[in-house]
Image: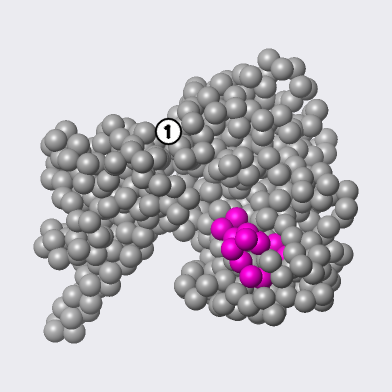
């Protein structure tokens, strides 16, 4: 069933209706459940026993959920079932039962699209940067007094550890995903496009295929819609140029170091573990406390959107500038922005060692992350644990991974974190990535198949002033948590013994 058919049939129940979520612990699914719960729907759901950070959110909101799938739970009192893309009626008993009872069923991405059709909606997309950019959009919307709802692809510190922020019900700003063209279910009036590169090799056969998907998404913009794009990113600029040449009546707003116009970054410097920079159209100096030039890009995109929405919301009085009060609020919001879960996230600091975690799993994201950390902490040794995600991505971008990881002073590599949706037909594995990296790097390089196997060696190596970061979309993040707990216990023992 297409999303247009869904809208025509008004498949969403009225506020107060009962909605059941299959796979409710998933970040995106849980976030939509939060929004619907806040709006007044009766929400419940199911998932596995595995514990996620979303467990705390669901419990805090008092949303009932079950840690087992049980078809007998599905009955005619349920108005709508929304499910994670990980489940289908063929494999899940609850969805099969809903189908038998003719209860409407929506995949999460279609439900998100239907939700977006209710608002003046902005979709934030790109191979990298969309989660942090969306979170920054949220804190700026709050600073500017915009009645918006925000949905990110990860928990944001400034959202109270949730993936959503509810400030009103006029605007909707949401992270939208390119995988399998899921973002085509969304109804955008505005789009932020951060980057376009070849990724998801199990679905997109080459760069042209993924670029075409982003072009198709941007074509969903209505006449008078707005495309805010990163002029520094060749792929994003190419997509914008295609849209421009089609004369669709879409406003094109570039941002970045090479951009023309108000959102050109005219200066950038690192000062006291913070980045300071200026935009052509903003009279004040801006500062953000998370590392990397790419974060200045993310801020520029968010400011461009914020100004667009301020103009829409407050009218002629705000046509040319945010005004002094809003600029001050935005500056404070940026200075206090703490990032999102698994995006240059600081797990903790102990014994002089900083422990970090980052989701970066594409070579371009890895390079910008490591470069950003190095720019903030140039005199500190950077030790990286990287776990590559998917055989297809590793095989297709092997040389790029090796180059990107060269930013590590000491590198630990592990087995490939496989995806359930692909088979390894390339013969690639973690050891091949290690062999290639070790042959080209000047820094020490180690291989441990399982991340936890590196624990003892890292206990020997790590010392005061080091930065240790777990990097990738795999489960090596547990290694960082374990190391932090170990060194913290040593610190406590030292304190206890004077």
Q: Residue 112's spot in the image, x, y percent?
A: 70, 53
Up the image or down, 246 lies above or below 51; here it is above
Of 166 and 94, which appears nearest the observer? 94
Question: At 56% from the left edge and 77% from the top edge, which residue is drawn?
Answer: 67
Question: Which stretch is magenta?
Answer: 80-94
Q: Which residue is mark 1?
A: 268
Question: At 26% from the left edge and 47% from the top edge, which residue is drawn?
Answer: 430
Up the image or down, 150 lies above or below 34; here it is above
Of 310 and 129, which appears nearest the observer? 129
Label 1 Cα neighbours within 10 Å, binned few <14 / some 14-19 / many ≥20: some
Q: Residue 227's spot in the image, x, y percent?
A: 67, 30
In the rendered structure, the answer to whether residue 395 lies left or right of residue 176 reads left
In the rendered structure, the answer to whether residue 107 lies left or right of residue 49 reads right
Kindly indicate the quadrant of the structure image that contains residue 65: bottom right
Q: Residue 12's spot in the image, x, y percent?
A: 82, 60
Of 262 and 486, which appears nearest the observer? 486
Up the image or down, 35 lies above or below 495; here it is above
Residue 429 among those drawn in magenta = no
Question: At 63% from the left edge and 77% from the top edge, which residue is drawn?
Answer: 70
Identify the main secondary structure in magenta: loop
Q: Quadrant of the C terminus?
A: bottom left
Of 193 and 86, which appears nearest the observer? 86
Using the rendered image of the protein, determine whether residue 381 is visible from the camera's viewpoint.
no
Furthest residue in direction top, as rendered:
245
Using the rendered image of the protein, determine whether residue 226 is visible from the camera's viewpoint.
yes
In the rendered structure, the answer to whether residue 319 lies left or right of residue 475 reads right
Question: At 79% from the left edge and 69% from the top edge, which residue is drawn?
Answer: 101
Furthest residue in direction bottom, as rendered:
496
Residue 82 among those drawn in magenta = yes
């Amino acid at each position: 069933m297409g999303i247009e058919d869904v809208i025509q049939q008004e498949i969403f129940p009225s506020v107060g209706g009962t909605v059941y979520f299959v796979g409710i612990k998933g970040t995106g699914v849980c976030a939509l459940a939060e929004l619907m719960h806040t709006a007044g729907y009766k929400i419940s759901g199911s998932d596995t026993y595995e514990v996620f950070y979303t467990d705390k959110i669901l419990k805090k909101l008092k949303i009932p959920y079950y840690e087992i799938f049980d078809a007998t739970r599905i009955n005619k009192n349920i108005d709508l079932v929304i499910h994670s893309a990980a489940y289908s009626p063929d494999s899940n008993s609850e969805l099969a039962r809903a189908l038998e009872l003719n209860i409407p069923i929506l995949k999460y991405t279609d439900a998100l699209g239907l939700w977006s059709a209710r608002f003046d909606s902005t979709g934030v997309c790109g191979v990298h940067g969309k989660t942090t950019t969306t979170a920054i959009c949220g804190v700026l919307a709050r600073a500017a007094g915009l009645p918006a709802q925000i949905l990110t692809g990860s928990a944001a510190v400034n959202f109270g550890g949730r993936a959503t922020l509810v400030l009103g019900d006029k605007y909707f700003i949401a992270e939208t995903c390119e995988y399998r063209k899921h973002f085509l279910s969304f109804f955008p009036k505005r789009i932020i496009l951060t980057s376009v590169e070849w990724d998801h090799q199990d679905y997109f056969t080459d760069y042209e295929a993924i670029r075409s998907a982003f072009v198709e998404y941007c074509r969903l913009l209505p006449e008078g819609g707005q495309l805010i794009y990163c002029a520094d990113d060749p792929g994003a600029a190419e997509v914008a140029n295609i849209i421009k040449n089609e004369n669709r009546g879409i406003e094109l707003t570039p941002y970045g170091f090479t951009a023309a116009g108000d959102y050109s970054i005219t200066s950038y410097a690192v000062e006291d573990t913070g980045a300071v920079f200026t935009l052509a159209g903003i009279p004040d100096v801006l500062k953000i406390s998370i590392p990397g030039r790419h974060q200045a890009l993310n801020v520029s995109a968010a400011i461009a959107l914020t100004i667009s929405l301020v103009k829409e919301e407050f009218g002629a009085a705000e046509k040319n500038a945010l005004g002094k009060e809003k600029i001050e609020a935005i500056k404070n919001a940026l200075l206090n922005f703490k990032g999102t879960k698994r995006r240059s996230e600081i797990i903790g600091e102990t014994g002089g060692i900083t422990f970090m975690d980052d989701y970066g799993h594409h070579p371009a994201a890895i390079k910008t992350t490591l470069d950003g950390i190095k720019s903030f902490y140039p005199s500190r040794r950077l030790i990286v644990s990287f776990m590559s995600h998917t055989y297809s991505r590793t095989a297709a971008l092997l040389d790029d991974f090796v180059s990107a990881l060269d930013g590590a002073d000491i590198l630990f590599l592990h087995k490939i974190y496989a995806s359930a949706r692909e088979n390894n037909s390339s013969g690639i594995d973690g050891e091949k990535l290690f062999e290639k990296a070790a042959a080209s790097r000047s820094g020490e390089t180690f291989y441990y198949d399982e991340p936890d196997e590196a624990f003892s060696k890292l206990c020997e190596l790590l010392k005061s002033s080091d930065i240790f970061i777990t990097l990738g979309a795999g489960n090596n993040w547990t290694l960082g948590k374990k190391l932090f707990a170990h060194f913290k216990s040593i610190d406590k023992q030292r304190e206890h013994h004077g």
